[in-house]
Amino acid sequence: MSNRMIFSTSSLKNFPLGLLMFFLSFHVLHCYAVYQITPSQPLFQNQTLMSSSQIFELGFFTPNSSQNHYIGMRYKNMSPSKIIWVANRDNPLSYRDSYATLTIGSDGSLKLLDGQQNIVWSINVSIQTKNAAAVLMDTGNFVLQDVHSGNYFWEKKVKKWETDWEAPRNRCETYGTCGPFGVCNAFVSPICSCLKGFTPKMIAEWNKGNWTTECVRERELICQKPNYHKWIYFRGP
């Protein structure tokens, strides 16, 4: 199933800053909905977490023309759709990672794991219970609660009609993609190069597509070399 949102840079100028809505073109990767996440029932990329009245849904998505993968919340039945919260906006997954999951770990914390089981995002809350479940409320709140008592261990409140996030349209819009003294150009391949007079510090990593390693000067500046100059003193008349 494919869902589209229309993004227009010029149209955003008409919105007040505090109420700015970012319209994104993206594909939501899901086949069916679930209504809670538990330690034994993680959220996979072919699923969405749905609020009980199907007002909100949370799932994995890739913005159009982006190589980044996110998990976020949106209004279910609004057209065009609007993303209102993103968990891993500062640490996106690769769009090639099809095995990432949102799960509750053995410590009771809600975590986003990549395909290698590395923690990409978490709520950093440790809970000593086996009865925890993550639920999306009809108010737009995303909560981790005790399924028996209903008590909240963690809560993410989302204000209606507001968002403070815009997905990068390409990798060059993600800070630090090309590392110190690197230049990013999304219209060439590879997208990263070093400034004139600089060269990659770690050629092997650079060739693998890891451009976050810094570029260094091909030649040291005179001021960077040890000062072996001798002072010559002139005696006045």
Image: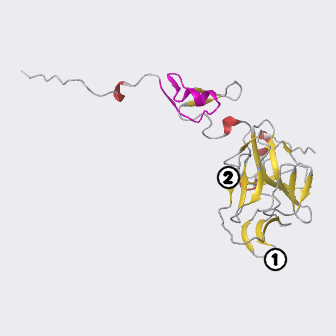
User: Which residue sits at x=25%, y=25%?
Assistant: 228
In this picture, residue 48 sits left or right of residue 124 = right
Which quarter of the picture shows residue 6?
A: top right
- On the image, which quarter does residue 107 sit in? bottom right
Residue range in magenta is 194-217
Q: Are marks 2 and 1 in contact (CB under 8 Å)?
A: no
Residue marked by disc 2: 119
Amino acid type, residue under disc 1 in the picture: His
Nearest the viewer among 16 and 225 is 225
Mark 2–mark 1 distance (CA, rounded to whole Å):
28 Å
Q: Residue furthest left?
A: 237
Viewer-proximal residue among 40 and 203 = 40
* Residue 204, magenta (yes or no): yes
Residue 120: % across, % down: 68, 50
Towards the viewer: 174 or 70: 70
Q: Which residue is mark 1?
A: 148
Q: What is the secondary structure assignment of the residue under circle 1?
A: loop
Q: Say which quadrant the C terminus sits in.
A: top left
